[in-house]
Amino acid sequence: MSNRAQVKKALQDMAMFFAEKGEILDQASYVKQKDKPILLSNIRRIFRSYSRMLDMMKRNEPELWLQASKPALPKVK
């Protein structure tokens, strides 16, 4: 695992990315994204796994996690 500054920066970048997308992406969907802020290989280097990064993000960035994971409201016609 990397140092605290790298972990914190990566968590903030990923939380902002998911908040902009409006959803938490699974690993397969994340890999397909063209505008991802961190390569999957770097996520694995920093956090050891994608799921561990998601767990750490939920604990360390709860506001952005809620913003990204809340369900979209249905469109009113």
Image (spheres, rainbow, N blue to C red):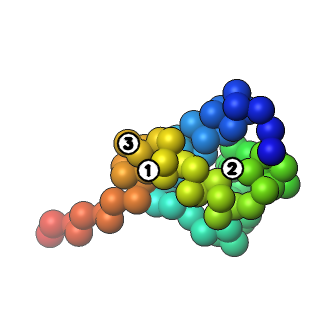
**Observer-nearest of 39 and 43:** 43
**Labelled pair 3, 2 in contact (Cβ < 8 Å):** no
When the figure is inspected, residue 51 is found, relative to residue 6, above or below; the finding is below
**Observer-nearest of 37 and 47:** 47
When the figure is inspected, residue 14 is found, relative to residue 40, above or below; the finding is above
Within-10-Å neighbours for mark 3: few <14, some 14–19, many 20+: few
Which quadrant of the rendered structure holds the C terminus? bottom left
State how far apart marks 2 and 1 are (Cα).
17 Å
State how far apart marks 1 and 3 are (Cα).
5 Å
Q: Residue 63: give x, y in percent of width and height.
A: 38, 42
Within-10-Å neighbours for mark 1: few <14, some 14–19, many 20+: many
Left-right relation of 64 to 26: left
Q: Residue at x 71, y 55 (%)?
A: 34
Q: Amino acid at mark 3?
A: Glu
| Residue bearing mark 3 | 63
Left-right relation of 13 to 40: left
Which disc, if any, is residue 42? Answer: none
Q: Residue 50: give x, y in percent of width and height.
A: 69, 61
Q: Residue at x 24, y 64 (%)?
A: 73
Q: Amino acid at mark 2?
A: Lys
Tag 1, which secondary structure?
A: helix
Within-10-Å neighbours for mark 2: few <14, some 14–19, many 20+: some
State how far apart marks 3 and 2 are (Cα).
20 Å
- Where residue 7 sits, quadrant-wise, is top right
Which disc, if any, is residue 36? Answer: 2
Of labels 2 and 1, the one closer to you: 1
Of labels 3 and 2, the one closer to you: 3
Q: Is residue 40 visible?
A: no
Q: Is residue 64 visible?
A: yes
| Residue bearing mark 1 | 65
When the figure is inspected, residue 37 is found, relative to residue 72, above or below; the finding is above
**Labelled pair 1, 3 in contact (Cβ < 8 Å):** yes
